[in-house]
Amino acid sequence: MRGNGRPGYSAYAARAAYLFLVTVLLTGACTGSPLAPSPTGSDAAGGTLRLLYDQTITTWDPQRMYSGPEGAIAVRLFSRTLTSYPAGGVGGVGALTGDLATDTGTPSDGGKTWAFTLRSGPTWEDGKPVTCQDVAYGIARSFAREQLPGGAPYPMTLLDIPSRVDSAGHEVPGYPGPYAVSAPSVTGTPTTEPTATGAPTTEPTAELTATGTAAASATAQPESGSGSPEFDAAVACRGATLTIHLKVPVPEFPEIVALPAFAAYRRDHDRGGAGTFDVFSCGPYRLDGPWEAGAGGRFVRNSAWNRSSDPLRQALPDVVDIRESIPTDTLVLRLVEDKAPDNTAIGISDLPSAAHAAALADPAVKARVSNPLSGTVELLQPNMKSPVMSNEAVRKALALATNRDAFAAAYGTTVMTPAYSALADSIPGHPTGAPTAAPTSAPTATPTATATATPSADPAAARAALVAAGVTLPVHIRVAYRRSTQADAAYAALKDGWEKAGFEVALEGLGEDYYRIVSAVDASAHYDVFRRSWFADYPAGAAVIPELFDGRMNLTDTGTGQDLGSFNDETINAAIEAAQVEVDPAKRAQAWANIDAKVTEVGGQIPLAERRRFFLRGSAVGGYSENPYLGGWVDLAAVSVTH
């Protein structure tokens, strides 16, 4: 989900141009042996952990995972990436460590090249070692968007591989993935899908552009299965060392390779698009029989897994049983009643707010509730092309009159917590003084839009500022937001504060096609303020600030990309460019914090709140935590059950 870039910005031009690929590309792993014994040395080992879900798992293919709990489950049960985080994200982003790799990688060439040495010991469930070529092949699969849609775009946007121009004039990866060269293997575990969707494609004939430099230095490599010398030059194996060449310096690359898109995958167990629910494990559990879409499946111990070669997964339960498509009311009732075997269950559903009050009313149930921040920030983007919002004094007055507390209260404090930054609480650079670390009082599940204005809003001062700036009152504004019952109440609460400040507000509630409407080229003529929700794919300001506020990579003749407000400030763009290549983590985090604060200061954004999740678990579950770096979902690395 990125916008376009324009030539002439040195190293940044390459970054902006290739990040544009995401807009085009997003319109759209690891069964057999007997049950292994429980690990020794832990009283918590053994038993069956149950995961209950009110929705359906979309895929177990790591290269197709993006949002939802699938990735958090997969990387703890059966799939492994180059790097990952300790259980629960303990230690913060700085505690990132090697997973399949021995460490978080060694940069060179100013951060454009990264080398990872693979551990000795990790194996697949058939006992064969996980090789450098397996990791390279997994990365190559991310390019096969026709057969494997939906995954994270970073291999395509960052790897130094030549691009091509498609029939629509868009710059897209020149490498189409491994299936354009050879058909995927058919030896993998059968799935419940009736037909295969991953038929081989033909090699594209579009002319390659000379934007990739690693290809020029291609030399003989052990075969990765990519079928492309350009790919094998950008992702090169030398024994146990994997070297990855990027188009531009990326200091946060160790955080990016923790995403499932960079997971290892065995070529001889790849069925392409037909393998949506195939699992061939290199982690502590294997799928016992086929996954039954709409019902679930059972993961049992992988006897080939070696604890000594896995520093992150305790793998305490003998079995992890996952059941999906459970009606929400039924799921909540089962967890509230806490009867065996549901007392050994975790609800991996983010429970709806209607269920919160009842769960919190009973102290015994409340003790099993968790209400973490989700990493998703709600904010407003004033439209810089709007005649009224082009006036900085008007934007600042709107921000001053914005009652975040009333906004969060309309949802309920178990759903929203006021925020003052686009950087979520878990992202380095998040302002430590901003009250998003925890609710200011005990969470309440009862929404109310009648909260009294607090220091987060001052309508009287906002009105005075408008008058001092010579602005004629009332100031007419049209605010676009995504409609829901709670959102209607929350924006009505904001409207109340804004109108006290001298604004006349027309709330424009839009439906499911909200983002299509507000990112269209003509949206700036219809709305003055846009609602935006943002979750960073990896914990860094680079995954937030440029995406939302760099006009060079967003604004095109066909739309605004993610920069709904058409914000494009030369000084801030220069600061973004500098932050993107800062190698010192502390300085980089501070740079993103400064840019975030500056965008707020000039009225380029009005942060509103960070969403919270609401989970419920059984009383026999131990070692429970969520991990903000696994999408804020439940972290299974250290979970145990009493049995």
Image (cartoon, helix red, strand yellow):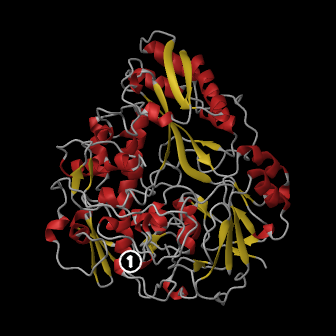
Residue 278 shown left or right of residue 331 in the figure? left
Mark 1 Cα within 10 Å, few/some/many (few <14, many 20+)? some
Residue 322 shown left or right of residue 335 in the figure? left
Q: Residue at x 33, y 39 (%)?
A: 554
Residue 624 visible in this rendered orientation of the protein: no
Instruction: Locate residue 610, reporting x and y percent.
Output: 57, 45
Quadrant position of the C terminus in the picture: bottom right
Amino acid type assigned to the residue bearing label 1 in the image: Asp
570, 54: nearer the viewer: 54
7, 516: nearer the viewer: 516
Q: Residue at x 38, y 81 (%)?
A: 118
Asked where in the image residue 381 lies, by quadrant, the reply is: top left
Instruction: Locate residue 92, reporting x and y percent.
Output: 51, 63
The residue beneath circle 1 is 134
Count the marks: 1
Q: Residue at x 22, y 53 (%)?
A: 164
Instruction: Locate residue 454, reporting x and y percent.
Output: 64, 31
Asked where in the image residue 452 lies, by quadrant, the reply is: top right
